């Protein structure tokens, strides 16, 4: 349960900090940009990758049932981390801090949510990284994605 809560917190923090800090109450619902930050570190590892599967199932559920179809943009960051002797760039080179897809990957100005769902549906245990948990760095990657590709002012 704690792992699921951490995942939800990642989603909520990004959505609240980026979108609602600059939006007035009247333009809050015009479009929605969400970057899922999914944890594939050793912290969520279990035999059979059940926790990882729950994270991915949650992402698919949100895409399928919650996002407005003609006014959403979606990205996904898959993260774990590296040891203390690694830089962020070295860790990215090992695919442990990875932008799997960005806000602009599946169409502009808004995404084809069927294509987004299909891409997430292809994520499996081979995408699980293990290792350290670099949440701060993953959130920085998500923030950069918003800064570089958001249709909203950030």
Image: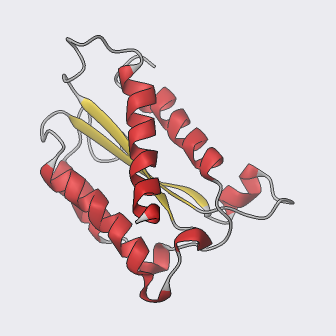
Mark yes or no: residue 75 visible. Answer: yes
In the depicted view, which residue is nearer to us: 83 or 115? 83
Number of numbered labels in the structure image: 0
Picture quadrant where residue 7 is located: bottom left
**How did the renderer colour the structure?**
secondary structure
Picture quadrant where residue 71 is located: top left
**Residue at the spot x=44%, y=37% of the render?**
14
Relative to 19, residue 91 above or below: below
Q: In which quarter of the image is the N terminus?
A: bottom left
**Residue at the spot x=66%, y=57% of the render?**
92
- Horizontal side, residue 1 vs residue 65: left or right: right
- Horizontal side, residue 42 vs residue 17: left or right: right
In the depicted view, which residue is nearer to us: 79 or 106? 79
Residue 26 pos. (x, y %): 20, 11
- Horizontal side, residue 66 vs residue 54: left or right: left
Q: Residue furthest right?
A: 85
Relative to 23, residue 108 above or below: below
- Horizontal side, residue 14 vs residue 110: left or right: right
Picture quadrant where residue 122 is located: bottom left
In the depicted view, which residue is nearer to us: 104 or 129? 129
Residue 45 pos. (x, y %): 53, 77
Q: Residue furthest front?
A: 1
**Residue at the spot x=39%, y=30% of the render?**
16
Residue 47 pos. (x, y %): 48, 89
């Amino acid at each position: 349960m704690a792992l699921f809560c951490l995942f939800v917190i990642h989603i909520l923090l990004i959505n609240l900090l980026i979108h609602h800090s600059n939006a007035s109450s009247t333009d809050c619902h015009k479009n929605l940009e969400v970057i899922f930050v999914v944890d594939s570190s050793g912290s969520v590892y279990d035999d059979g990758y059940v926790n990882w599967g729950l994270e991915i199932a949650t992402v698919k559920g949100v895409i399928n049932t919650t996002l407005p179809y003609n006014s959403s943009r979606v990205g996904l960051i898959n993260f774990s981390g590296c040891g203390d002797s690694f830089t962020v760039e070295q860790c990215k080179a090992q695919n442990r801090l990875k932008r799997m897809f960005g806000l602009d990957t599946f169409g502009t100005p808004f995404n084809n949510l069927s294509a987004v769902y299909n891409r997430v549906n292809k994520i499996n245990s081979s995408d699980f990284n293990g290792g350290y948990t670099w949440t701060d760095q993953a959130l920085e990657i998500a923030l950069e994605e918003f800064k570089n590709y958001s249709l909203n002012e950030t």
